[in-house]
Image: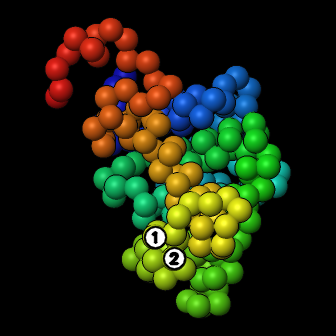
Amino acid sequence: MTTDDTELTRRDAIAALAAAGITGSAALAGCSTDGDAPDEDGSRPDDGSDAESLPAPLDRRHLDVLTAAAEVVYPSELDGVDDFVETFVGGRAADRPDHAAGVAEAADHAVEWTRSWMNAEFPALEPDRREEALDRMGAREAEPDPEGSDAERVRYYVVNELLFALYASPTGGELVGIENPQGHPGGTESYRRGPR
């Protein structure tokens, strides 16, 4: 079975986790095995099953912020963003709880900022308003710094986290012209073949 060149899969997320040095059971922590089939309308059942699959301190609201950010940070032609983000974030959080705490704090800041300045929580905003929010809070131009200002932490833990996951995945790497992202072995065939 072949997948679309613009579809991010859980295998892409596992490859991105491997590029971050996360393998084994931690890499599979974001993969829920039960109750994760989407409903007919494409939404996920609200039974709390995937919220439970996220290691503390992350929960569903943090994942919603990262997924909503990915929808505006990633190229619009990509499919499968929800599962990709959930798998990557869950695996990273299982392996690095201190990093997960930073992600949770940055996601909470994004929600509080948009609630105060745009009268809605970040995931509830339309995509163009989410882009505007990232610009207005300074997260797209800030230097990424895990110990820095709120904008610098949102840049580091939300924007850069998502971009790293995308570019380290085989599908995302190919989309931006990286033949073999770190952690994704292409084999000798990829070195003999010219650029596509």
**Residue 111 showing in the rendered view:** yes
Per the image, the residue denoted by label 1 is 141
Q: How is the image coloured?
A: rainbow
Q: CA distance from mark 1 to mark 2?
A: 6 Å
Contact between labelled residues 2 and 1, with CB atoms less than 8 Å apart: yes
**122 or 32, which is in the foreground?**
122
Percent across and percent down for residue 167 are: 43, 42
Corner quadrant of residue 93: top right
Per the image, the residue denoted by label 2 is 138
Q: Quadrant of the C terminus?
A: top left
Q: Residue at x 59, y 91 (%)?
A: 117
Q: Residue at x 43, y 60 (%)?
A: 73
Q: Residue at x 38, y 41 (%)?
A: 172
* Few, some or many residues within 10 Å of mark 1 (<14, 14–19, 20+): few
Disc 1 is placed on an element classified as loop
Determine whether, in the image, residue 27 is placed left or right of residue 131. Answer: right
Above or below for 156 versus 78: below
